[in-house]
Image (tube, rainbow, N blue to C red):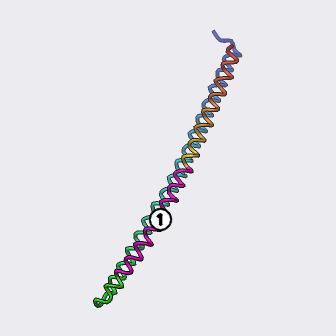
Amino acid sequence: MFNQNEMNEILEAIKEANTSAYETVRTLGELNLSTWEKLAEKQIEAFNICFDAGVELLKASAEIKDIKDVQALVNTEVVRAKDISEKLVANSKETLEVANAASVEYRSLVESNVESITKKVNEAAKKAA
C-alpha cells in the first residue's frame, strides 16, 4: 500500500496539521479573551458614567430647600444630561473601535489560515502529480 517514506510524509503532514490547528485555536482563544476584556471594560465605563450622574442628581435633589432651588436642579439635570450623552457617545465610539479592531484581527487570522491551507494543499497536489 504505502512505503515507509510515504508513511513518514503522511505522519509528518498530520503532525503539522495538528500543530497548526492547536496554534490557531490558542490564538483564537487569546483574541476572544482580549476582546471580551476590552468590551467588558467599556461596559463598566458606561455603567460608571450613568451611576456617577445619578449620584450627582441625587445630591442636587437633596439640596432643594425652596422653589428657587428647583430651577437650579432643573439646570443641573440639563447640564448632566448633556454631559452624560456626550460621554456615552464617546464610550460607544470607543466600543465600536474595539469591535472593529477585533474584526480586523479575526479576519487576519482566517486569511492567514486559508493561505496556509491553500499552500499545503497545492504542495500536496504537486507531490501527488
Residue 84 image position (x, y, % from top left): 43, 70
Residue closer to the observer: 11 or 42: 42
Q: Secondary structure at mark 1?
A: helix
Q: Residues within 10 Å of mark 1 (few under 14, many from 20)?
A: some
Going 45% across and 60% down the picture, which residue do you hit?
43
Going 65% across and 30% down the picture, which residue do you hit?
16
Q: Answer above or below: position of 46 versus 20.
A: below
Q: Is residue 99 magenta?
A: yes
Name the residue carrying label 1.
Answer: 45
Residue closer to the observer: 111 or 121: 111
- When asked about the image quadrant of residue 56, the answer is bottom left
Residue closer to the observer: 51 or 86: 86
Relative to 126, 23 lies left or right? left
Q: Which residues are magenta?
A: 74-101
Residue 13 image position (x, y, % from top left): 65, 25
Relative to 94, 10 lies left or right? right
Residue 90 image position (x, y, % from top left): 50, 64
Q: Answer above or below: position of 89 versus 30.
A: below
Q: Residue furthest left?
A: 67
- When asked about the image quadrant of residue 75, the answer is bottom left
Q: Residue furthest top?
A: 1
Kind of residue at badge 1: Glu
Query: What is the number of callouts on the image?
Result: 1
Q: Is residue 118 magenta?
A: no
Q: Quadrant of the C terminus?
A: top right
Q: Quadrant of the N terminus?
A: top right
- Prevalent SS, magenta region: helix
Relative to 51, 32 lies left or right? right
Residue 128 image position (x, y, % from top left): 67, 15
